[in-house]
Amino acid sequence: MRPPHSPPPQARLLLDSAALAANWQDFAASVGRADCGAAIKADGYGLGARAVMLRLAAAGCRTFYVAHWQEVPPLLPLPDGVTVSVLHGVTVEELPAALELPARPVLVTPGQVALWRQTGRPCEAMVDTGMNRLGLAPAEAADVLAGLDVMVLHSHLACAETPAHPQNEAQRACFADVVGRVPARAYALANSPGALLGPAYHFDLIRPGLGLFGGGNRPGGWPSRPVAGMQARIIQLRDVAAGQSVGYSAAFTATRPTRIATVALGYADGYARGLSGLGWAEVGGVRCPAAGRISMDMAAFDVTDAPMLSEGDWLDIPFDPNALAALSGRSAYELLVALGQRFERVWQ
Ligand SMILES: *Cc1c(COP(=O)(O)O)cnc(C)c1O
């Protein structure tokens, strides 16, 4: 129960535990004897990192990745047998906190390795096989890591979303060479699109993120199952005459007598401004298009064909990251991680 005077949220994310678990199980089944972890950085791709971790752990996932040490405390306490690793490694400033937290770094520079070596603790490490973003150089990795207990040695693909891109095979071959030379207990290369490139990319562990949360594809070539749906309260209903316009810049003009529902959902909540005129609400199977500009805190939907609505009703606003990415010109990644903190996140 909420405290008596806590204002109730006016927008909800309805989150589908079964879809999340099924997406993960599809990835896990596709890698055979390799392990399937989960990237839950950026608050579990906007869905709520701890809630996501608990549901994936219940589905069998044991290995979780975040980007920052800051992202570890909200996950605590960890379920039994679960490990959390921090993809950015660890800096001098983060070290005191890192030593108190039940997580380990994915070390990315020789300086980080030297720092962590003094702790005597196990680690993971990242080798850069051609993305030129983060990680040890392949030629230096064996020397830099010598003597450390490397639980997982990682690399990351730059072009996995484009299966035919020649850099995929170049990075895979480079990583296979590293695997032969640099001792570690396990090796991991693939994110979600990387896992779909085939068994040669699976090594011992995959690190899917997006594909678990409804973006991109899952194994078998199927689109990932959407995990989130939005609901927002109708603040006001109004009847607009043909020729009148709605919202900022008068971007929508009614061509017929039109009923407009103004709801408590805007781009501050992650309903992207790029969905202006393109997103939609759904009422009993009727598609009600977004009318005009999405505002920061509000959006208007043309509900002329759904006359049963009243002020105060909850409007269902589908949130399929792939479909909305195609419409909005933003990536499914951006749409997910932009989901705001004003939503009540309701797991079903
Ligand atoms: C974010 C991230 C992932 C997950 O990537 P997706 O494309 O969301 O599956 C995997 N590995 C690393 C190193 C990452 O930074």
Image (tube, rainbow, N blue to C red):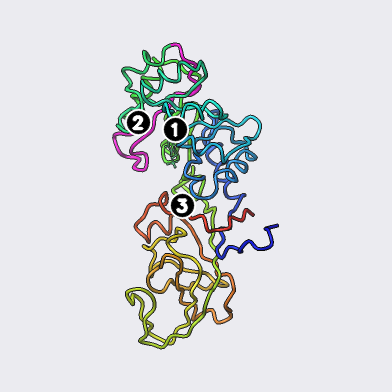
Q: Residues within 10 Å of mark 1 (few under 14, many from 20)?
A: many
Q: Nearer the viewer, mark 1 or mark 3?
A: 1
* In the image, residue 22 lies in the stretch drawn in magenta: no
Q: Earlier in the sequence, mark 2 or mark 3?
A: 2
Which residue is labeled 3 in the image?
Answer: 336
Foreground pick, 12 / 3: 3
> Disc 2, disc 3: CB below 8 Å?
no
Give residue 313's position: percent from left, percent from top. 59, 73
> Disc 2, disc 1: CB below 8 Å?
yes
Which residue is labeled 2 in the image?
Answer: 134
Q: Does residue 322 lie above or below 206 as drawn? A: below
Foreground pick, 281 / 284: 281
- Say whether residue 278 is left or right of residue 231: left
Which residue is labeled 1 in the image?
Answer: 87
Circle 3 SS class: helix
Please identify the dominant SS of the magenta region: loop
Q: Amino acid at mark 3?
A: Leu
Question: Looking at mark 2, is its residue's CB closer than 8 Å to ligand 1?
Answer: yes
Q: Does residue 94 lie above or below 306 as drawn? A: above
Q: Quadrant of the N terminus?
A: bottom right
Mark pair 2, 3: CA separation: 23 Å
> Disc 1, disc 3: CB below 8 Å?
no
Q: Quadrant of the C terminus?
A: bottom right
Q: Amino acid at mark 1?
A: Leu
Residue under the point 38% across and 52% down: 331
Q: Amino acid at mark 2?
A: Leu
Circle 2 SS class: loop
Residue under the point 49% across and 76% down: 261
Mark pair 2, 1: CA separation: 9 Å
Question: Looking at mark 1, is its residue's CB closer than 8 Å to ligand 1?
Answer: yes
Give residue 186's position: percent from left, percent from top. 49, 22
